[in-house]
Amino acid sequence: MSDRIVAGIGFRRGTGADEIAALIARALGTIGASRTDLTVVATAADRAAEPSICQAAAAFGLSPCPVGAPALEACDARVVTRSARIERLRAVGSLAEAAALAAAGRDSRLALPRIASAGATCALAIPHDTARHP
């Protein structure tokens, strides 16, 4: 698996850091990646300073990467999951997928579409320069 993986996170207010960190770990396990493969934890810029995402990212030795609304919206055509609620709130089908793709850079690809826990979503993306081709 790639040694550069970006996790995109969406979460509801009140979701604990442990739940977010566990979801990231589950996502990494799903694609056969290790905790050390994770290089970025990305989320919407207006949520990146919230304690739960800061603490969850810190569990992986990282700080949250804020992604602005224009960058999220620019990735909307590449997300594979559509949530009507998130489309209304954020103008993207999946905040987690859009954040992962935006933070991973142009021509990145999803390694794992959005998965969810009770209060959070996580998607994984791989930057173009480390993406494996068939």
Image (cartoon, rainbow, N blue to C red):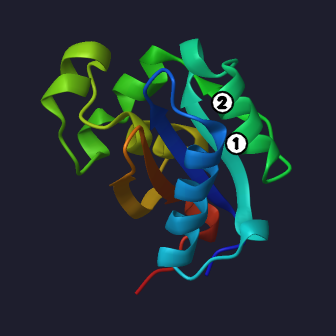
Camera-side residue: 39 or 18? 18
Residue found 64% across the figure and 22% down from its top: 48
* Drawn side of residue 50 relative to residue 8, left or right: right
Q: Are marks 1 and 2 in contact (CB under 8 Å)?
A: yes
**Label 2 amino acid?**
Ser
Residue at the limit of the structure toward the bottom, as seen here? 134
**Label 1 amino acid?**
Ala
Residue found 43% across the figure and 26% down from its top: 12
Work out whether residue 108 can be spotted. Answer: no
Q: Give the vertical position of 17 relative to 122 (above or below).
A: above
Name the residue that disc number 2 marks: 52
Counting the numbered discs, the total is 2
Image quadrant assignment for residue 103: top right
Q: At which x and y percent is residue 73? A: 35, 24
Q: At which x and y percent is residue 111? A: 45, 66
Callout 2: 10 Å neighbours few (<14), some, many (20+)?
Answer: many
Camera-side residue: 38 or 24? 24
For mark 2, give the secondary structure.
Answer: helix
Work out whether residue 77 can be spotted. Answer: yes
* Separation (CA) of disc 1 from disc 2: 6 Å
